[in-house]
């Protein structure tokens, strides 16, 4: 029991329910210790006691319950930060739209412990192209290259698909475990920043009645899409262009007569991607044709069918059902800053969704911001840490827009005769190379040139630098205990702590590094000793959370460690290498910047 403040009730997620009284937000630092430190989760402060129907008491307001809002909320909840998520729609959104999930995003869903996404996502079907009226495909090819087998450093290696509405449903289910339910029909109208808080005008529609009130939050995250009110409040410019003439159409369909194992394309004008998410004969439409009034087609289904049949020239195909359809105007735009003071923006409110990287980038924005905000809110990091959200994400999004605009240009310049080759995308779209090498908070003592690096470069073994995605390494055997109980680095990394991986030959240097970590709050750091393959007879190091042997040799290979030497790798809560250092000095340099 922690005492005082009788109005706050606290439960331990996800299963056990113990109530604890809190003295202040400081209590959020408390973590339950369990035999497996990776599974320790911070406490959650949930509701005002005795008022079970009252809104969630939360210092953070997330505006918008799309991908970015849900990921921001879930990451904060996993960090023990109470969040309120408001969504102006009265119902959860339908439609597959951003269904493409890049391998890096799959990794982040793994760290956020949403296994349903990986379980239900499927490989993108092969593309088949046709001439109008043609029944036999002109060619069959993969959109994202041939499917590959996972590798030790990349367990998620293929670009997968799962409807954005389904992914959002799984994220909401996870959030609900933290008693955070998306509040529908709640729209932020305006906001005003003050020195210590943000004042928000919120309209709620319930049972046909609309009420408005002013509320106070410590922090606001605008995940309210491209036309969001939060970005406008920040006075952020949304620089770039809007392609009015290149409006597109998206929708979910059921079509009889079309093989539902492929992605059928008629030039770049009409594409029907088969998806198991919509059941038998389910397809997602993507159409774009310069000069066609897509808004009209979205509103008038007869006109829509006429347009589709005029392009595909296949009367044998029966469009049996149009579940949902919407037009979509490509924006090639990004915000010039992603936050200021106590207000931040993520996802579609930051950048445009052209080119199939938007949802993925939105998830990555939210992940980058949320762990930093959690540490600042707990009083463990300086507010300046939040500036690095801007600094790290702006170059990545700028590069993403360059890539995706090139794709957009290719697709609108093409026509009915264009073959599927025009759509093929390179490895950079998998986003495993997205990096923050130029960030001021990363530390690399191994002589790597970090500034000016391409933030989207695709990486291979032996090139790891601070700021890069932290590779996985399976086959790690416990030094003490049954060797067959393998683990992997990805099963240790979690978004609510830093993981300090100490590659070492013997326990003496490890001991001094573990002892140096004692000065930092224990709830924010996990330590992992990794001994080279074949090590035995080593004495246990007191205080280390994990003591492992690199049974497969993968960790030493990917982290570029020569057996017999010591290397310390700090992996940030967003599974990015924060520091690659030789010992305590480098470690202190890193944490000196990130923690108070
Ligand atoms: C056709 C199409 C295909 C796409 N394909 C892909 C793909 O394959 N891969 C990919 O990664 N991305 C893709 N995208 C992009 C992806 O859909 C977007 O980038 C993503 O939806 C952005 O997520 P978000 O949560 O930031 O914003 P949004 O999804 O726009 O969500 C914003 C939410 O905020 C709510 N809101 C707005 N204002 C307020 C307010 N004032 N108060 C309360 N709530 C508010 C909205 O109702 C909405 O629910 C595609 C997009 C389209 C249109």
Image: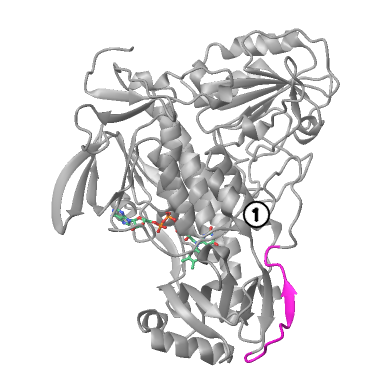
Residue at figure coordinates x 69%, y 80% from the top left: 419
Q: Which residue is at 58% across, 90% downward?
A: 316
In this view, 585 is above or below 169: above
Give the color scheme: rainbow, by chain, secondary structure or one colour. one colour
Based on the displayed image, in which of its 4 quarters is residue 140 positioned?
bottom right
What kind of secondary structure does the magenta stretch mostly adopt? loop
Give the percent coordinates (x, y) of residue 344. 37, 44
Secondary element under disc 1, as helix, strand or loop, is helix
Residue in the foreground of this view, choosing between 525 and 7: 7
Residue at 54% across / 47% down in the picture? 116
Taking the magenta stretch, the answer to whether it contains residue 350 is no
* 549 to the left or right of 492: right
User: In the displayed structure, does residue 260 sit left or right of residue 290?
Assistant: right
Q: Residue lying farthest front? A: 280
Left or right of 578 in this view: 342: left
- Give the percent coordinates (x, y) of residue 244: 42, 77
The reply to whether residue 458 is visible in this rendering is yes
Which residue is painted at 42% across and 18% down in the image? 30
Is residue 337 in view from this perspective? Answer: no
Residue marked by disc 1: 430
Q: Is residue 35 above or below residue 241?
A: above
Quadrant, the N terminus? top left
Residue 135 in the magenta stretch? The answer is: yes
Ligand 1 - quadrant of the structure image: bottom left
Q: Which residues are magenta?
A: 132-144
Q: Residue 190 placed where, x, y %?
A: 22, 51
Percent position of residue 594, x then y: 51, 26
**Mark 1 CB in 8 Å range of ligand 1?**
no
């Amino acid at each position: 029991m922690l005492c005082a403040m009788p109005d706050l009730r606290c439960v331990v997620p996800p299963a056990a329910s113990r109530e604890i009284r809190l003295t202040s937000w400081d209590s959020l630092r408390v973590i339950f210790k369990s035999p497996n430190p990776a599974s320790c989760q911070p406490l959650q402060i949930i509701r005002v006691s005795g008022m079970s129907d009252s809104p969630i008491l939360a210092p953070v307001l997330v505006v918008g319950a799309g991908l970015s809002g849900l990921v921001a909320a879930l990451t904060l909840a996993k960090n023990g930060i109470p969040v309120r998520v408001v969504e102006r729609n009265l119902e959860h959104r339908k439609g597959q739209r951003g269904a493409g999930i890049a391998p890096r995003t799959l990794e982040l869903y793994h760290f956020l412990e949403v296994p349903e996404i990986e379980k239900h996502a499927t490989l993108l079907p092969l593309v088949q192209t046709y001439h109008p009226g043609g029944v036999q495909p002109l060619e069959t090819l993969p959109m994202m290259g041939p499917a590959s087998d996972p590798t030790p450093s990349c367990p998620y290696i293929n670009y997968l698909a799962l409807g954005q509405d389904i992914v959002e449903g799984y994220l909401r289910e996870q959030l609900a475990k933290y008693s955070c339910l998306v509040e529908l029909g709640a729209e932020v109208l305006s906001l005003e920043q003050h020195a210590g808080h943000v004042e928000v005008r919120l309209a709620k529609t319930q049972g046909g009645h609309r009420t408005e009130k002013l509320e106070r939050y410590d922090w606001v995250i605008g995940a309210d899409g491209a036309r969001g009110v939060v970005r406008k409040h920040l006075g952020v410019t949304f620089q770039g262009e809007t392609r009015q003439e290149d409006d597109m159409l998206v929708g979910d369909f059921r079509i009889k007569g079309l093989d539902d194992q492929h992605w059928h394309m008629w030039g770049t004008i009409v594409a029907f991607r088969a998806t198991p998410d919509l059941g038998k004969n389910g397809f997602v439409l993507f159409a774009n044709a310069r000069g066609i009034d897509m808004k009209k087609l979205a509103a008038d289904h007869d006109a829509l069918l006429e347009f589709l049949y005029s392009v595909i020239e296949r009367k044998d195909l029966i469009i049996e059902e149009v579940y949902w359809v919407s037009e979509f105007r490509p924006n090639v735009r990004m915000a010039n800053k992603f936050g200021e003071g106590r207000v931040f923006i993520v996802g579609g409110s930051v950048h445009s969704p052209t080119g199939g990287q938007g949802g993925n980038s939105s998830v990555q924005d939210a992940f980058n911001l949320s762990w930093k905000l959690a540490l600042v809110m707990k009083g463990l990091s300086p507010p300046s840490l939040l500036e690095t959200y801007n600094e790290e994400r702006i170059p990545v999004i700028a590069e993403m827009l360059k890539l995706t605009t090139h794709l957009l240009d290719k697709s609108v310049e093409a026509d009915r005769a264009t073959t599927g080759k025009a759509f093929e995308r390179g490895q950079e779209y998998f986003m495993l190379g997205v990096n923050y090498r130029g960030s001021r908070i990363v530390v690399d003592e191994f002589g790597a040139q970090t500034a000016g690096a391409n933030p989207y470069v695709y990486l291979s073994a032996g090139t790891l630098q601070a700021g890069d995605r932290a590779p996985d390494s399976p086959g790690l055997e416990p030094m003490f205990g049954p060797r067959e109980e393998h683990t992997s680095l990805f099963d240790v990394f979690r978004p609510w702590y830093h993981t300090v991986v100490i590659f070492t030959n013997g326990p003496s240097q490890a001991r001094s590094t573990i002892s140096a970590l004692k000065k930092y709050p224990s709830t924010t750091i996990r330590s992992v000793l990794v001994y080279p393959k074949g090590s035995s007879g080593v004495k246990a190091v007191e205080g280390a959370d994990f003591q492992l042997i690199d049974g497969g040799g993968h960790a030493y290979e990917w982290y570029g460690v020569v057996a017999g030497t010591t290397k310390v790798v700090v992996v940030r809560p967003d599974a990015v290498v924060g520091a690659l250092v030789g010992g305590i000095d480098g470690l202190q340099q890193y944490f000196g910047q990130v923690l108070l």
